Amino acid sequence: MVAENRLGRRSFLSLAGAGLMLTGCGSTTARPSASATAPRNTFVLAHAAAPAGLDPSRRNSQETARIATQILEGLVTADRSTGEPAPGLAESWELADDRRSVTFTLRRGVRFHDGAALDAAAVKANFDKWQAQAESSEPWASRCAFATAFRHGTSSSLVASAYAGTEVTDERTVVVKLTRPYTPLLAALTQPAFGIASPASIEAGTENEHPVGTGPFRFDSATADTVKLSAHEGYWGELGDVGTLEMRVIRDAHVRCAALLTGEVDAYDLVGLDAFAPLARRGVQVLYRDPYSVSYLGFNRSVPVLRDVAVRRAVASAIDRGALASQLYPSGTNVADQLVPARFNVDGENLQIPGYDPQRARDQLRASSYRGQALRFYYPRNTSRMYLQEPERVYAQISAQLTRAGFRLDPVPMDWDDGYVDAVTDPTAGHAFSLLGWSGSFRDPDGFMGPLLGTPDAQLGDDDAGLLTAVNRAATMPQGDARNAAYRTLNDRVSAVIPAVPLAHPVSAVAVNSRVASFPLTSTGFERFNELRLA
């Protein structure tokens, strides 16, 4: 088994907080000679939470993925305009006729930041590492990107892995093999989680604290609230305008806004509701991402009363999703009737999520198995997410509505950085309700259905054999009308089960200062800062 670094998020932050500056990579290999002059400009971006380590293959963390996008590159990349797979470290690929393997041909002359050459063996070392992680006993293993894309490592007999292995044909040719077709394979591989790391860093087990890739930026240093990257002079592609990129953690949306207005940062992500008007008055450019995430009220169905679909339907009837979307999310946010955003054009045709009806909620609750017991409601504090920019305000409105419907709640606020996601995705944690969501990371409906419902261990894991079969069958179907129809039917079926109450498909926004001539905005939030242009 590939050696695995066991330092988790807390260890990463503890080391950084102690002032450790991670500037060496443990390799004695000389760096390649400079192929370009590094730009001298510094650019500072504020984001809303600390990264959950720096290895994107372990955690579904927006901040980790954003940093990794600059350092690591995948075999394929997502076209910024269309989201479709485009050449990355692989200059070309060929899909087998039976759709059960893809043969990739690697670019020539690409080197890692430690000087080692990119070859097929390096690609295989990464796939071996990802496979080992998905098979590990780590609490996050079932939710890492390799596990959710390939349905790998699940303990359930209801879902088999789609991954059959990776084979090196020659120095520049590598074959990824499948046990069954997985239609969005190329799109899934555009995720930062599938960025190719230096084999030396994998062997050393340092990739969670010091990633080493082939990207336009190399890791420079980290403290508790800042990660600094430097333009890599030996990069095989275009370096762009930024020589030093600083990713700074500023948890409070108001403080992020103030930091931009005072010149402390050049841009910040997740503009809060109260900032849009002041920014407009100051002439600050605000860039909007299309709705590409879903926020939801989650149910822990290990709590006996929440196994009763009548209780879950009462919850849905009690929540005014229209008011939430219009009052607590940026303008342009869509009310969610299903988990998959509208951009995929696979909306269900017989959706059964109840609309807002307080009297109906009270009637349903009286007829259900609920008997007035207190239900613990976890919600996050001190963060903004693409799907949940102001969680405390969302919680306050939902909890008031549920209380009016007859529910008795025990609120449990929890700081995001204190392991909130781990807590609310652990069925043994003792909570009943939680606020969470999912941000799309690749262009396919399975980018939502797989991580949320693809296995019993998924984020909204369900052991309904029929539902699992439908989710995984849709992922294997060839692109076309039949597959789209399967997802429409699947959306209807999920709405009847109600594994969670979808709340909104929010827009999110980035504010930039006057230095920025062009910002490489993407719907996923995985912007590549070598594409940033400064005035």
Image (spheres, rainbow, N blue to C red):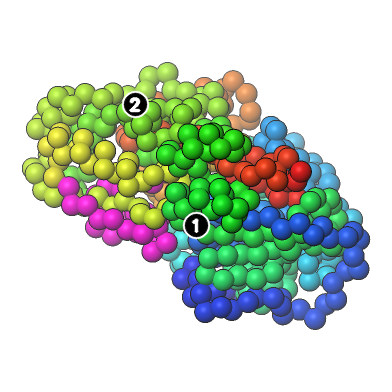
Does the segment drawn in magenta span residue 420? yes
- Which residue occupies 52% across, 69% down? 224
Q: Give, as a three-letter code, the residue at label 1.
A: Ile
Q: Secondary structure at mark 1?
A: loop
Q: Nearer the viewer, mark 1 or mark 2?
A: 1
Please give the label number shown on residue 17: none
Residue 193, image x, y percentages: 61, 54
> In the rendered view, does 366 fall on the left or right side of 110?
left
Q: Which mark is residue 250?
A: 1
The residue that disc 2 covers is: 322
- Tell me the magenta residue range: 409-438
Q: Position of residue 19 (x, y in %)?
A: 56, 78
How far separated are the C-alphas under marks 1 and 2?
A: 30 Å
Q: Nearer the viewer, residue 335 or 245?
A: 245
> Vertical placement of 63 versus 26: above or below?
above
Q: Earlier in the sequence, mark 1 or mark 2?
A: 1
User: Looking at the image, which residue is at 68% across and 55% down?
Assistant: 43
Q: Is residue 26 above or below residue 60?
A: below
